[in-house]
Image (cartoon, helix red, strand yellow):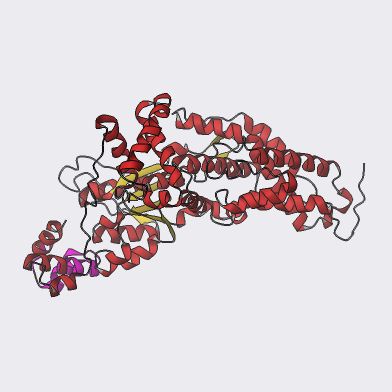
Amino acid sequence: MSLNYQIMSDTSLFSPTDRAFAEAVQALSLANPFTPARIDWERRALGADFKDAGAEWNRLAPSEQAHPNIGLITERVSALISRLVKAWPITTIRRVSRADARLFSNLVLFELYLRYSARFDEVTRASLAGAGAATRRLAFYAEFQREVERHLRQPGLTMLEESPPEHIFACLFQLRRAFHHIHRSLVGGSPALARLRAAIWESAFTRDLELYRRVLYARMHDFTTVITGSSGTGKELVARAISLARYIPFDPKQGAFATDFVESFYPLNLSALSPTLVESELFGHRKGAFTGALQDHAGWLETCPPEGTVFLDEIGEVEPAIQVKLLRVLQARTFQRLGETKVRHFRGKIIAATNRDLPAEIRARRFREDFYYRLCSDQIRTPSLHEQLKEAPAELTPLVAFILTQLVGEPHAADLTTGLVRWIETNLGKDYAWPGNVRELEQCVRNLMLRGAYVPAGPLAAPATDDWNELIGRGRLTAEELLTRYTRVVHTQSDGNIEETARRLNVDRRTVKARIIGSR
């Protein structure tokens, strides 16, 4: 059968009513799911059929599938796609508008995401259980590929030219995996936690999901994330959620993902190790590079795959000399093992965290300004427990219940929660500051279980004075402390080079080294 293609004016694929619905669905599918905007677009899509009960699923509900608004929208999307495919305007193939093609393609992606979300969840759970499911052959990809091509190979559509089925499959799995980890990694439904979840989502996908799918998915390693917040606010949980939500390519020939997302997170607490061990764990070392280096060792930067993440906890504690080396990693994506001259390449992502005020550390000459500006292309701040409870006092109950569940199991936790919350509110008050954040709440719960009481220690750390010129003026530094601080300033300005520091100070390099090491 031959087709007579006609050159006609643009023909709309949608009736006015269908277009309004499709535009609302497109907007909500591209919106950050942890913001109120997502709920507004659901309301606009459903009109009078929108259900207010439990509408704020982005904070509290356990699953999208259980939400009535999403279920109703999905039914309508499926029906609309079916009607459009049957009535596709093949005689006007060359004049399908870009806006209509975009609308239809995003409807298809929305429907595919929700239709396959349960199977994506199965893969996620199996991988988290240690089964390595993501790197095994996924039989349902063949069905997914047929569905994609059946809908997106319509005349006039171009999505498959820029996004083949395997890329769409990888993107949808990433979306589902990100929702799983971001939603479940952080306990609580306060507005502060909702904002934090929204910030994590943007760290994973940026604010433009379409641009991410076309281009940025392959370039997110160039965006370094720094997480700030007081101790005990879950900075590592945030870093892990971002890492586990990264894009992983899907190989259609193997029918499996390139790597297992569970094995993509490489954490390193910089304050827990000596500078030599920090360098060894990060960059690796050659046999004989230092005392105890009995064999070659590959560091995290070398071990981490392109889809992986190296997490540098307590980045504010790192020595200036290591800051210089990390700056090179961020600028040139290259590094060298200790004791080796061979240049190696880092292709993963860096996430750093600190409870220090980095701008203050820069003013105090303890943190390099150029390193800071390389770190802060993406910034997240974790809210304190006091902030969360001030906005939503009722959140204390689910937090206590969660801690109890970890300690005694769910059935017993339900029996104990009310009594413990009542004790906390009666004895500590609803405005208690929780200086130790969630860690303190955990210890409070343990104390109450063991002894029936909890006595807060109060703030344990004295406020730090970052301006050492002020300390000099007040006569608060010893001569040795003054020399040590000044040596560190010159050492930082000398790019961490001990020989150059010694030359500028006109002292022996051993004196410089002793002051640097002794100041730790």
Where does the image place residue 162, in percent across and percent down from the top left? 66, 51
- Residue 84 lies, with reference to residue 379, above or below; the image says above
Q: Is residue 306 visible?
A: no
Specify whether 146 is left or right of 362.
right
Which quadrant, please, contains the N terminus?
A: top right
State which region is magenta.
487-509
Question: Which quadrant, please, contains the C terminus?
Answer: bottom left
x and y percentages locating residue 63 in the rendered image: 57, 36
Residue extending farthest to the front is 426
Q: Seen in the image, is 380 located left or right of residue 444? A: right
- The part of the image, by quadrant, that contains residue 300 is top left
- Majority secondary structure of the magenta segment? helix
| The residue positioned farthest toward the top in the image shown | 411
Residue farthest to the bottom, as pictured? 473
Residue 43 within the segment the image draws in magenta: no
Magenta includes 497? yes
| Left or right: 453 in relation to 90 | left
Q: Position of residue 278 (x, y in %)?
A: 25, 49
Query: What residue lies at 63% left-to-right and 35% top-to-bottom?
Result: 116
Q: Is residue 242 visible?
A: yes
- Residue in front for this viewpoint, 346 or 492: 492
Residue 61 in picture, x, y percent from top left:
55, 39
The structure residue drawn at horizontal position 68% and vertical position 49%, both measured from the top left corner, is: 43
In percent of the image, x 23 and y 58: which residue is there?
319
Q: Nearer the viewer, residue 428 or 40?
A: 428
Q: Quadrant of residue 49?
A: top right
Q: Nearer the viewer, residue 327 or 60?
A: 60
